[in-house]
């Protein structure tokens, strides 16, 4: 063992290993990038879009196809798309210098904001990979400046990813996690599985580095489900080791250890360096605790060597710390002193790097006047301006005492102020729309129903409502978790909307209870629609979640008549019928015409 330890840090990773790590690094980025680049494509450019389906390993063919497009007479938008396509392949090939040269050959400042976001994101990511933080911060600032002008969810989330990349390169994982939550928020609001996949996967990565393992276990199902919906196996493979390690940290799962060892043996072609280092260090710690000293040493040495190649001080220090522990356990005091000295030197270098990055933060901070100009462009009220200036000033004081005070504080303030602005804009929308399901909110649906009922009565038309309540919904939450419960609510509303007429509208009364309003509809028509909805809910495919998950609902149907002539009376009648349906065994329909309902359905 002494001979093994005496090899020390003289072991160096081969050039081939470094090349492979660079390729692994870009895979996660390009997985996100190809999805968002497709946003710039249209149905009329199928041949140009087809460039993304080429086999990137065949460089000569890719370059040949790109050259063919260069010879064509292209419109402005087509030229931009071609540059993005070239940039995509340069990132896959790990040629970040060439990618930067390509992107800088075009004047993006004159492009539309939605195009700028894509270009600035790619430049930020490229400079981060080359370790040029100053340039990365420059383009991150540009992204932040145009962020308030972006409304398209995918582009907005791409901007957040750009800022998060910089934060992660600075080991600011809490700030990056905050951005991942904002990405997830965009995904929920736009109902985009793509945005949710990349947002939740980034959240898991940051939670892991923050050692918040219970939260990873809580959110793993959602991340895997969203990435599964877009068939992104790479992202699932990338976060699976982190999920499994978190599970082992909490539960000491020995079967999980075997799976992690298998993952490590095959991870060279299916992960990025950071996830590789995390897995390597975890297994090294496991072997150290189980007295497999030689295996632990090899893994610690490998983690140190690989992270040295990448210049990642965080993992270098972790690897050296492990080598120091191994030296103490084996009684090799000479090696222990050697590793301790190198560990201290690296810690000092790490601190020097942080100081340098802090200097760069200060040189690229966003001025408060610029923020106020952005706020004024968004036409905030004087009251909100005062409030946001107070937030700005107070946050400045807080961040002034931190190492990363200037840039980090003000950059976060930019996002906070933007969120305040966006929250104000959404306040009205939130009054009209239920956040989770997209159905009309209770207050708005009842207000709209009263207006429609009044119009129907004035025109001598019928008006009916259908209220329905999901059966055993509490048990679904208890057995499968609230994330599944949220999915059920969202899927139910999507299904209902597919089965109602154009003039009908659906709202959420609260919890798992909903209302469908049917202007100009008789009871018989409402009963037919209710039955159609009941059958559709019953047929929702839940096998990917659990064969035990069944979605059904009980329905109450009521129609205006001589006695029931107001919305309040309609609701009372419909609620009474709803509970009657539940008392009959659930998953059925009852109406305020009682025994006539069956005859009416038959007649229709």
Image (cartoon, rainbow, N blue to C red):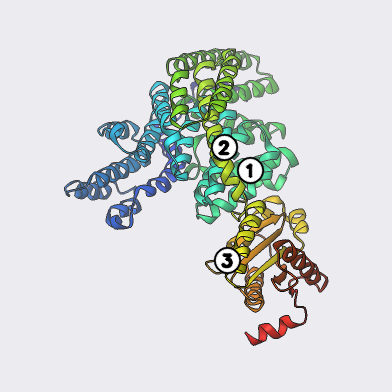
| Nearer-the-camera pick, 98 or 124 | 124
Quadrant placement of the N terminus: top right
Q: Earlier in the sequence, mark 2 or mark 3?
A: 2
Q: Which of disc 2 and disc 1 is earlier in sequence?
A: 1
Q: Quadrant of residue 33?
A: top left
Find the distance from the CA under tag 1 to the CA under tag 2: 33 Å
Residue beneath label 1, please?
Answer: 243
**For this view, does 96 lie left or right of residue 597?**
left
User: Of residues 101 and 345, which is closer to you in this image?
Assistant: 101
Q: In the figure, 64 relative to 364: above or below?
A: below
The answer for how far apart the CA atoms under marks 2 and 3 are is 29 Å
Q: Specify the label residue 473 is tagged with.
A: none
- Asked if 390 appears above or below 21 in the picture, the reply is above
Q: Nearer the viewer, mark 1 or mark 3?
A: 3
Residue located at (63% from left, 16% from top):
336
Query: Residue at coordinates 51% horizontally, 31% vertically from top-left?
Result: 418
Name the element at disc 1. helix
| Residues under numbered marks 2 and 3 in contact, where contact means CB atoms less than 8 Å apart | no
Q: Which residue is mark 2?
A: 423
For residue 467, which quarter of the picture? bottom right
Visible residue check, residue 541: no
Identify residue for label 3.
Answer: 504
Residue 274 visible (yes or no): yes
User: Which quadrant of the figure has residue 344?
Assistant: top right
Label 2: which secondary element: helix
Comparing labels 2 and 3, the label whose residue is closer to the camera: 3
Horizontal and vertical percent position of residue 443: 66, 51
């Amino acid at each position: 063992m002494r001979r093994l330890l005496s090899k020390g840090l003289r072991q160096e990773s081969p050039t081939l290993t470094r090349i492979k790590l660079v390729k692994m690094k870009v895979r996660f980025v390009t997985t996100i990038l190809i999805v968002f680049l497709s946003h710039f494509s249209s149905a009329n450019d199928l041949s140009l879009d087809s460039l993304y389906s080429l086999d990137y390993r065949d460089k000569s063919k890719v370059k040949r196809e790109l050259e063919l497009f260069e010879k064509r007479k292209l419109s402005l938008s087509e030229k931009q798309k071609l540059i993005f396509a070239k940039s995509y392949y340069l990132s896959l090939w790990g040629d970040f210098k060439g990618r930067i040269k390509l992107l800088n050959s075009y004047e993006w400042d004159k492009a539309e904001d939605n195009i700028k976001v894509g270009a600035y994101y790619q430049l930020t990511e490229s400079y981060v990979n080359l370790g040029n933080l100053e340039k990365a911060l420059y383009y991150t600032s540009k992204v932040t400046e145009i962020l308030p002008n972006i409304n398209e969810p995918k582009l907005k989330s791409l901007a957040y990813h750009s800022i998060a990349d910089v934060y992660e390169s600075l080991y600011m994982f809490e700030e990056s996690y905050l951005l991942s939550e904002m990405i997830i928020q965009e995904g929920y609001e736009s109902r985009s599985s793509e945005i949710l996949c990349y947002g939740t996967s980034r959240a898991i990565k940051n939670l892991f580095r923050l050692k918040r393992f219970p939260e990873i276990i809580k959110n793993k199902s959602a991340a895997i489900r969203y990435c599964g919906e877009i068939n992104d196996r790479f992202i699932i493979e990338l976060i699976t080791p982190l999920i499994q390690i978190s599970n082992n940290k909490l539960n000491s799962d020995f079967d999980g250890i075997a799976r992690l060892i298998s993952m490590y043996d095959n991870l060279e072609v299916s992960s990025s360096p950071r996830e590789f280092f995390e897995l390597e260090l975890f297994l090294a710690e496991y072997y150290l605790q189980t007295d497999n000293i030689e295996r632990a040493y090899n893994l610690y040495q490998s983690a140190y060597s690989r992270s040295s190649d990448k210049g990642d001080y965080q993992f270098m220090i972790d690897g050296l710390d492990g080598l120091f522990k191994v030296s103490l356990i084996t009684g090799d005091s000479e090696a222990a002193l050697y590793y301790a000295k190198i560990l201290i030197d690296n810690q000092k270098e790490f601190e020097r790097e942080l100081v340098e990055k802090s200097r760069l933060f200060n040189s690229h901070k966003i001025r408060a006047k610029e923020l106020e100009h952005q706020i004024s462009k968004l036409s905030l009220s004087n009251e909100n301006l005062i409030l946001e200036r107070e937030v700005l000033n107070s946050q400045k004081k807080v961040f002034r005492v931190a190492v990363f005070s200037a840039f980090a504080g003000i950059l976060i303030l930019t996002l906070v102020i933007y969120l305040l602005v966006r929250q104000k804009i959404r306040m009205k929308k939130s009054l009209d729309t239920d956040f989770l399901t997209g159905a009309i909110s209770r207050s708005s649906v009842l207000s709209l129903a009263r207006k429609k009922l009044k119009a129907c009565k004035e025109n001598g038309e019928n008006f009916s409502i259908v209220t329905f309540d999901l059966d055993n919904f509490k048990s679904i939450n208890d057995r499968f978790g609230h994330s599944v419960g949220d999915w059920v609510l969202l899927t139910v509303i999507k299904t209902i909307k597919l089965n109602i007429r154009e003039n009908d509208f659906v709202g959420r009364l609260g919890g798992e209870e909903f209302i469908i309003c049917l202007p100009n509809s008789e009871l018989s028509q409402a009963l037919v629609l209710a039955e159609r909805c009941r059958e559709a809910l019953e047929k929702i495919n839940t096998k990917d979640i659990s064969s035990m998950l069944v979605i059904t609902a009980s329905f109450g149907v009521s129609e205006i008549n001589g006695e029931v002539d107001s919305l309040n009376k309609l609701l009372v009648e419909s609620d009474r019928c709803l509970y009657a349906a539940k008392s009959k065994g659930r998953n059925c329909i009852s109406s305020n015409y009682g025994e006539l309902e069956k005859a009416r359905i038959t007649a229709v």
